Image (cartoon, helix red, strand yellow):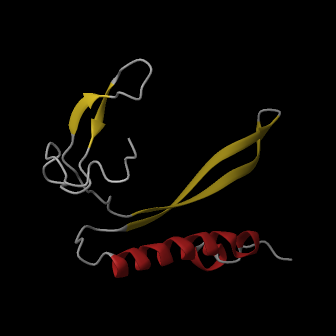
Amino acid sequence: MPMLKLNMESLAKLKGGLVAIMLEKQLGQMARDIEHASDIKDWRKVTLEIRARPVLDMGELDSVEVEFVVTGRVPARVTSSRMITRDDLESPVGQRQLFFQLDAPDNPAQQSLLDDEGDDS
């Protein structure tokens, strides 16, 4: 088999097409993220990084080790909830913990009418 010069065309043939598969997978993930979160206007990014270093044999250049790194970045998803701190009565050391009110997510200190539901005591 002839030696191939590394370029965009030959990259698809390298290692049985593995680099191309890695790149295609990240591009697909980017497309799915855009489709499922089109309300988030931030940029998505796919990066193909090619890095190389010399391999020496007895002080002379023997070959070049080349790595291909394919990464993707999609915007972070952010949500928040209001919580309060209270003593954790179930903790053996009595640590303060964060608590939230399931029935009133914007008012964690609100008492729920359902607080005692299912309590057999």
Task: Please state if 70 lies on the left or on the right of 73 as rendered.
Answer: right
The answer to which quarter of the image holds residue 38 is bottom left
State whether residue 75 appears in this view.
yes
The answer to which quarter of the image holds residue 15 is bottom right
Task: Name the residue located 78 percent from the left edge and 71 percent from the top edge.
Answer: 3
Task: Please state if 61 lies on the left or on the right of 9 as rendered.
Answer: right
Image coordinates of residue 32 in percent, x first then y, are 43, 78
Image coordinates of residue 7 in percent, x first then y, are 60, 72
Task: Name the residue located 23 percent from the left edge and 76 percent from the top edge.
Answer: 39
Question: How many marks overall?
Answer: 0
Return the residue nearer the eye: 119 or 93: 119
State whether residue 6 appears in this view.
no
Quadrant containing the C terminus is top left
Quadrant containing the N terminus is bottom right
Residue at the far top in the pictured view: 93
Task: Name the residue located 34 percent from the left edge and 68 percent from the top edge.
Answer: 44
Return the residue nearer the eye: 102 or 111: 111
Task: Please state if 2 lies on the left or on the right of 12 as rendered.
Answer: right
Return the residue nearer the eye: 39 or 19: 39
Where is 73 relative to 31, above or below?
Answer: above
Residue at the far right in the pictured view: 1
Task: Name the residue located 83 percent from the left edge and 33 percent from the top edge.
Answer: 58
